[in-house]
Amino acid sequence: MGKITDQRLAHAATIAKSGSLQTAVDNQTLPRFLDLTVSEALLLGLLAQNVTKFFTVLGHGSTEFGEVLRIYQEAGLVKVMGLHNEIEASHAATALRWITGEKAAVVTSIGPGALQALAASLAPASDGIGVWYLFGDETTEDEGYNMQQIPKPDQDLFLEMMKTMVKAYSLHTPESLPTALQRGWVATDHPYRAGPFYLLLPMNVQSKQMTGFNLSEIPSGEIPRMGAADGDYDKAIDWILEARKPMLKIGGGGRNASQELIQLLELINGAAVWTPIASGVIPYSNPRNMMVGGSKGSLCGNFAMENADLLIAVGTRAVCQSDCSRTGYPKVERVININSDFEDALHYRKTLALIGDSSSTIARLNQLLDQTQSQRRRKPTNWLIECSEKRHEWESFKQQRFQTVTLYDDFWKRDVLTQPAVIKTATDWARANQAISIFDAGDVQANGFQIIEDEKIGQTFTETGASYMGFAPSALLASAMADRPFFAIAMTGDGSLIMNPQALIDGAEFGVRGCILLLDNNRMAAISGLQKAQYSHDFATSHKKPIDYLKWGSSISNVLSLECKPTMKGLVEVLNKAKEYNGLCLIHVPVYYGENELGGMGVFGRWNVGNWSEETQLLRHQIGL
């Protein structure tokens, strides 16, 4: 190994001195044909794609690649964060790409570790975030069972499993590495449907020496975006001009089209409703913004969905909770669907699909619509007035809850803060202090996306695609890995924090500056509430005794644990202390759970779940959209 180590040290030093792999090859300080191991060649391929951040949980299936990472980190070419859980690693990598745009890879061993990361990759797969996953895999010579492989005498079982999720590749043959890198590049950098890419690394292949590997075969570059859709814009304009109650439903694919969407709203005299992943795409202050809609939507968002006659869907997958399991638009007669994906664009019946880049397509539609409306005018309607009245009702509804700061709680046996009051105060504080809000799955998240008042994209990140509990605390690790560290608040419930508590240990280890705001109601309240609504009883979603989270946090060096007084002033005080602290802070906030409707934001939509399914499905088929 001495010779191989020396080679790696020399290669890393040369690349570091040159500034990049491509520069080293161009100025011939690094030969174009290079002798190196598969694992080092893989790392060079990732460097060429600007993948320099690695969240790792190393094991016997990844020690070889880990050694390459060690050498290249010492040369200053990569940054490695060795963590305690693969789910945590996946969430951190996802958050880094989502919040900062910086690319990252997750490295695990074979078997259980890879499967944990696979489970967590539901989040980037659902939210359209490109992340590399490098998994150890069983050896290629089939000498017998490898420890932690799937215990079945068949080939490529992990590959079959990964391919079922999204894109995967097994590096069975070392010389196929350039193809693997190309497929991973397209999957993780796809401009419209980015997602995870799983590269399986057989344990005996990683250390194989390749003679004269051609560095020119390593793919890199920029993947071009689509242009405006080629479609029947004349028909789209006719439909818009004939509609009396047009609305936009904006999904993640519309996040880059904020200005175009605002202009379109004015031209069509329409109302906007968005999915949680697109919060901020229309400023909260815009009077046409009816906020979130769906099974946990706002009064005004759901009003717009219930009464619109024309739906312009932009970059949305029509997830069940977002469109009330396809019953969210009972009066819509026509759909203009702007999307880069054919299947998503043709999801609804009565659809005019415009397949292309959303911002370019909307810009073209706006231009043509503006020209047409100089000759043909839409009939005046009271649509915006009706929506505005409903928004005013929603604002009053929210204020009632924000002003109800405390309620008596049967578990805590005292008055404690309500979730709406805490979330409102915390998100207002975050915007005022240029802090990012990251919401975890569960009741905190559901209340949160009904409360947030973002004026632009990037103020709030809420993982609703997979609704993965434990995302927010793990996401804080991205702040310590980022080129430009940021301060964020992980807004989480006790049920979600327990899913990934090791983020406290790793956050302290790697110097995260951020805050876990723990809203503790001693249960998984989103499910308890659903059980009560459906069956009048909650079951197996709470625990009998409180957990001392302050002691838990204080047991970890460099974690500042703070109890919040049951006042908004007390909350602001501890948030200020968290911002001033040079490290990770855990703020414990006991919150209300119970029957009082002022303790939460409520539910105003339908959803095909549990004993609601039959009625919801019947309505869907009656609507026929």
Image (tube, rainbow, N blue to C red):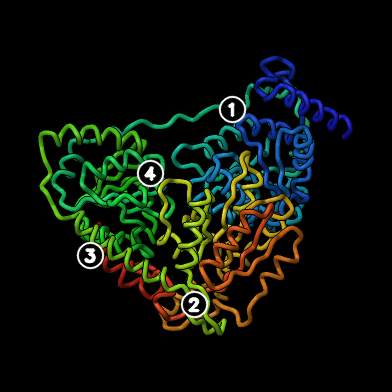
Res. 167 visible in picture: no
Residue type pointed to by label 1: Pro
Residue type pointed to by label 2: Tyr
Is 455 in front, or is 335?
Answer: 455
The residue depicted at 39 percent of the width and 61 percent of the height is: 321
Mark 4 vs 1, N-terminal side? 1
Q: Nearer the viewer, mark 2 or mark 3?
A: 2
Residue assigned mark 1: 219
Position of residue 97 measured from the top left corner of the image (x, y, whole percent): 56, 43
Q: Nearer the viewer, mark 4 or mark 1?
A: 4
Q: Residues within 10 Å of mark 1 (few under 14, many from 20)?
A: some
Residue assigned mark 2: 593
Label 2: element kind: loop
Is 595 in front, or is 13?
Answer: 595
Mark 2 vs 3, N-terminal side? 2
Q: Nearer the viewer, mark 3 or mark 4?
A: 4
Whole-Å distance between the Cαs marked 4 and 2? 35 Å
Contact? badges 1 and 3 (CB < 8 Å): no
Position of residue 159 measured from the top left corner of the image (x, y, whole percent): 61, 47
Label 4: element kind: helix
Whole-Å distance between the Cαs marked 4 and 1? 29 Å
Label 3: element kind: helix
Whole-Å distance between the Cαs marked 2 and 1? 53 Å
Mark 2 vs 1, N-terminal side? 1
Residue assigned mark 4: 254
The residue depicted at 41 percent of the width and 44 percent of the height is: 255
Residue type pointed to by label 3: Gln
Residue type pointed to by label 4: Gly
| Residue 421, above or below 267 | below
Q: In the rendering, which numbered label is found on residue 622?
A: 3
